[in-house]
Amino acid sequence: MVPAFLAAARRGDFEGLLRVLDPEVRLTVDTPNGVVVILGATKVAEGATARVAAGAAARGRAVLVNGLPGFVSWREDGTPLSVMAFTVVDGRIVAIATVIAPARLASMNLPDPG
C-alpha cells in the first residue's frame, strides 16, 4: 500500500490515492509550529499530491518506523526533509504519521541518505 500511495501522489493520481486510503484515514503532521491533524481520504489525498510535489527534488527510501512501513526523505544536501509512518489495515492506509519539524528530525536516529 505504501508504494502505491507514493506512486499515486507523485503522479497526482487523486483516484489512485482514494483507492489506497481508508475513508476515515487520519494524517498527523508534526510541524515546527505544532501538530496538524487532517481527517478523511478526500482531504488527505488533496494534500498528498501537493506535499509530494513540493518535495520532488528530495531523495527518499522506504524504511521501518517503529515497526511500521514508512518513508524517509532528504533534501539534496542530505538534510532530513520528512519521515512518514503508515498504518495499514485490511489493505488500506488508516493512519499516516509525518514529521517535518527540523528539530524533531534532527533528534531521530535516521539512516544516511546514501
Image (spheres, grey):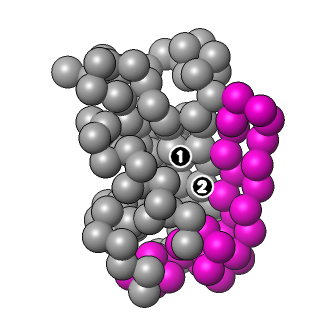
Q: Residue at x 69, y 38 (%)?
A: 30
| Type of amino acid at the residue the image marks with label 1 | Ala
Task: Give the total of numbered labels.
Answer: 2
Tell me if I can see residue 89 in this picture.
no
Q: Is residue 100 left or right of residue 40?
A: left
Tell me if I can see residue 79 in this picture.
yes
| Residue 81, horizontal then vertical, whole percent | 45, 31
In the picture, the disc for residue 85 is 1
Magenta residues (range):
16-45
Label 2: few (<14), some or many (≥20) within 10 Å?
many
Which quarter of the picture shows residue 113?
A: top left
Q: Quadrant of the N terminus?
A: bottom left
| Residue 38, horizontal then vertical, whole percent | 73, 62
The mark nearer the N terminus, 1 or 2, is 1
Residue of label 2 = 96
Helix, strand or loop under label 1:
strand
Which quarter of the picture shows residue 71?
A: top left
Helix, strand or loop under label 2:
strand
Q: Quadrant of the C terminus?
A: top left
| Residue 92, horizontal then vertical, whole percent | 51, 74
Q: Residue at x 31, y 48 (%)?
A: 56
Residue 84 vertical position relative to residue 7 in the rendered view, above or below: above
Check if residue 36 falls in the magenta segment: yes
| Residue 112, horizontal then vertical, whole percent | 30, 17
Q: CA distance from mark 1 to mark 2?
A: 6 Å
Q: Is residue 90 left or right of residue 29?
A: left
Residue, far left? 114
| Type of amino acid at the residue the image marks with label 2 | Ile
Residue 40 vertical position relative to residue 100 in the rendered view, above or below: below
In the picture, the disc for residue 76 is none
Callouts 1 and 2 close, C-beta under 8 Å: yes
